[in-house]
Amino acid sequence: MTYVVGDSCIRCKYTDCVEVCPVDDCFREGENFLVIDPETCIDCSLCVPECPVEAIFAADDVPADQRDFIALNAELAKVWPGISKAGEPLADADDWADVPDKLQYLAR
């Protein structure tokens, strides 16, 4: 089982999760979203409690309305560059933290 980044990360991109991940480049970075590479994730779950917007789920626990994020993480992990160090969240991340249904704002 792998871990999956869901909807809450879009337009926030907090990277607290990246800092604790023991696998270099397991997280992949897009313009306004992070994904987890299912090929390199070692299922350690260290990232889950670090996400301030609770956007990371075990694949088996992804909410029903976000199941498409399993395939989306796998797809984008193949094309986005890896990230191994925490960075700054997006400038308006706090404004977007509690906004639901943000898939329409995903920058590919």
Image: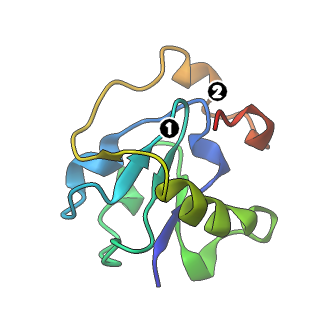
The spot of residue 43 in percent (x, y) is 35, 78
Display coloring: rainbow
- Left or right: residue 6 versus residue 88 is right
**Residue 105 to residue 90: above or below:** below
Residue lying at 42% horizontally and 26% vertically, measured from the top left:
89
Q: Is residue 67 visible?
A: yes
Lower position in the chain sequence, tag 1 or tag 2: 1
Q: In front of the other: label 1 or label 2?
A: 1
Q: How many marks?
A: 2
Contact, CB < 8 Å: mark 1 with mark 2?
Answer: no
Residue lying at 36% horizontally and 39% vertically, measured from the top left:
15
Residue position marked by numbered label 1 in the rendering:
30
Q: Amino acid at mark 1?
A: Gly
- Left or right: residue 102 versus residue 49 is right
* Secondary element at tag 2: helix
The spot of residue 28 in percent (x, y) is 41, 49
Q: Amino acid at mark 2?
A: Trp
Residue lying at 54% horizontally and 23% vertically, measured from the top left:
94
Q: Is residue 51 visible?
A: no
Circle on res. 96: 2
The spot of residue 106 in percent (x, y) is 68, 37
Which quadrant of the view contains residue 107?
top right
**Residue 74 to residue 86: above or below:** below
For the residue pair 34 and 61, the one nearer the viewer reads as 34
Residue lying at 46% horizontally and 77% vertically, measured from the top left:
2
Mark 2: few/some/many CA within 10 Å (<14, 14-19, 20+): some
Which quadrant of the view contains residue 52?
top left
* Secondary element at tag 1: loop
For the residue pair 17 and 68, the one nearer the viewer reads as 68
The spot of residue 71 in percent (x, y) is 65, 68
